Image: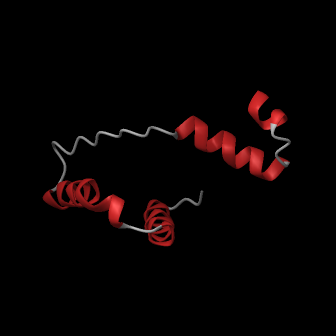
């Protein structure tokens, strides 16, 4: 909240920034033990190639996963 006030960030952007800060974990570990081979394949594919994706592709993949989970974010 102090940073939001310091930079005079508008309310909508402030909510997005606060949500991002709460969910941000820059070094993620995904445990797929007990899940299907497809889950492990997806986790490995992301781990090996996420840095090759541009911002639009990352947003598209995130939206696709959120839609599959039945929620929007």
**Colour style of the rendered protein structure:** secondary structure
Pick the front one: 51 or 43: 51
Please state the horizontal and vertical placement of residue 40, each as a whole percent of the image: 18, 54
Identify the residue at image location x=82%, y=33%: 6
Pick the front one: 6 or 60: 6
The quadrant of the image that shows the C terminus is bottom right
Task: Please indicate whether residue 13 sits to the left or right of residue 8 in the image.
Answer: left
Pick the front one: 30 or 50: 50
Please state the horizontal and vertical placement of residue 41, each as a whole percent of the image: 18, 60
Please state the horizontal and vertical placement of residue 52, each as a whole percent of the image: 33, 65
Task: Please indicate whether residue 32 sits to the left or right of residue 57 in the image.
Answer: left
Specify whether residue 1 is in view: no
Identify the residue at image location x=21%, y=45%: 32
Specify whether residue 73 is in view: yes
Please state the horizontal and vertical placement of residue 66, each as a whole percent of the image: 49, 61
Kindly indicate the quadrant of the structure image that contains residue 5: top right
Task: Please indicate whether residue 12 sits to the left or right of residue 28 in the image.
Answer: right
Q: How many marks?
A: 0
Residue farthest top in this picture: 2
Residue farthest front in this picture: 7
Identify the residue at image location x=23%, y=57%: 48
Kindly indicate the quadrant of the structure image that contains residue 64: bottom left
Identify the residue at image location x=59%, y=38%: 21
The quadrant of the image that shows the N terminus is top right
């Amino acid at each position: 909240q102090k940073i939001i006030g310091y930079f005079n960030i508008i309310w909508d952007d402030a909510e997005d920034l606060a949500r991002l800060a709460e969910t941000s974990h820059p070094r993620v570990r995904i445990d797929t033990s007990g899940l299907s081979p497809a889950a492990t394949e997806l986790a490995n594919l992301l781990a090996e190639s996420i840095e090759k994706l541009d911002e639009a592709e990352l947003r598209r993949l995130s939206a696709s996963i959120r839609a599959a989970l039945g929620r929007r974010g």
